[in-house]
Image (cartoon, rainbow, N blue to C red):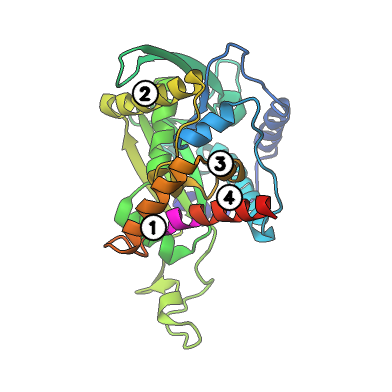
Amino acid sequence: MDAYYASPDTSFYDSTLERKFYEQKLRHIGYKPYPNDGLVTFGASGTNMCDRQLYFKNDKGTRAEKSADIPFRGRQRRQGTAVVDYVQLDILHMPKRLGKSAPFTMAVRDNGEWDFEDAAQERRVLTHPHPETGELISFAITAKPDGKFDYAPDGSRIIFEYKTKASGLRPMNGKLDYKGAQDDHKRQVVAESLVFGIDEALIVYESTHKPSWFSDEESSSVTKGQKTWKEGAPLTDMRAFYVRITDVMKTQLLNDLARQAALVYAGEVPSVTVEMTDKCGFCAFRGHCAATLSAGNLALLQRAESAMAHGSMAGKAAHKSLRNYLAGVTEISEEEAA
């Protein structure tokens, strides 16, 4: 990718490839409902939901909440979508622009379409034993990766996922240096592996915050923590992580999904645990979750928050998440009382 974006030959698109790309996009515009088979269907990118969120998502009587948001978040979501679209288009041009220097090329389906997103979407029904009871549980996984690559050196196929980050160059690199690819993104490619039977994946991150056009190392108006160049070179705005998907990783995910699907089939709303509150930030059922919290469950969470506040967890991320969730419960209770 660096070779492609550094080359002056990539300033213009090949009109034939560009037209074919957009024609494929147009063919797949529209709503594609899942088969009405009564099975819980997990989206590959949504296999990291907490038990309660998944339950509400599959409960026909519960609707996702829609509310106004901070404007920059809408622009950020739009920006991320646009970046991925252009990256896919660029990848299609790489064989022509780079020749043998492009070992990864977008796979092509039997019908001639490129194997990414809606054209690649598949839904697979799986049956797996419940990790605690051993009962066989059926559910489905649907997946539409950002791409599938053919890898020229050995002829293998690899899943491609592209993620944008708006946190800044230094925060992105610092977090990836420390933890590597995000756990939820690794779960996503494991789910895609279960659907497509491909056991290798590339998860690529791009920071939408770019280095200064020219070096800012000597600029006195840029503080040390904000400098985007180091030792004569720009900080990297792109990181790639290779994931080899093992049978152990598949079994762990299948255990989780079978257990969650069983909760939905049982028709009992799961209780909220402390760990679940780490995932509330992007949940579309936050208000409903807080409004339906039982008094007993609330008391358990309040005792846990008190213990954390007076222990080594005080002020840490898990404590903050729990406190924020409880604040939402309090806010709804006050509104109902009024």
Q: Nearer the viewer, mark 2 or mark 4?
A: 2
Mark-to-mark CA distance, 3 and 4: 49 Å
Verify CB contact (< 8 Å) between mark 3 and mark 4.
no
Q: Relative to 29, say whether 87 is above or below.
A: below
Q: Residue at x 52, y 41 (%)?
A: 293
**Disc 4 residue type?**
Thr
| Res 254 quadrant in image | top left
- Main SS, magenta residues: helix
Circle 3 residue: 289
Q: Residue at x 49, y 16 (%)?
A: 124
Q: Nearer the viewer, residue 84 or 152?
A: 84
Q: Residue at x 34, y 18 (%)?
A: 130
Badge 3 element? helix
Q: Nearer the viewer, mark 3 or mark 4?
A: 3
**Disc 2 residue type?**
Leu
Mark-to-mark CA distance, 4 and 1: 48 Å
Q: Is residue 155 left or right of residue 44?
A: left
Circle 2 residue: 254
Circle 4 residue: 10
The mark that comes first in sequence, 2 or 1, is 2
Q: Residue 41: x, y in percent? A: 53, 22
The mark that comes first in sequence, 3 or 1, is 3
**Disc 1 residue type?**
His
- Number of labels in the image equals 4
Q: Which residues are magenta?
A: 317-324
The mark that comes first in sequence, 3 or 4, is 4
Badge 2 element? helix
Q: Residue furthest bottom?
A: 220
Q: Is residue 322 left or right of residue 288?
A: left
Q: Nearer the viewer, mark 3 or mark 2?
A: 3
Residue 86: in sight, yes or no? yes
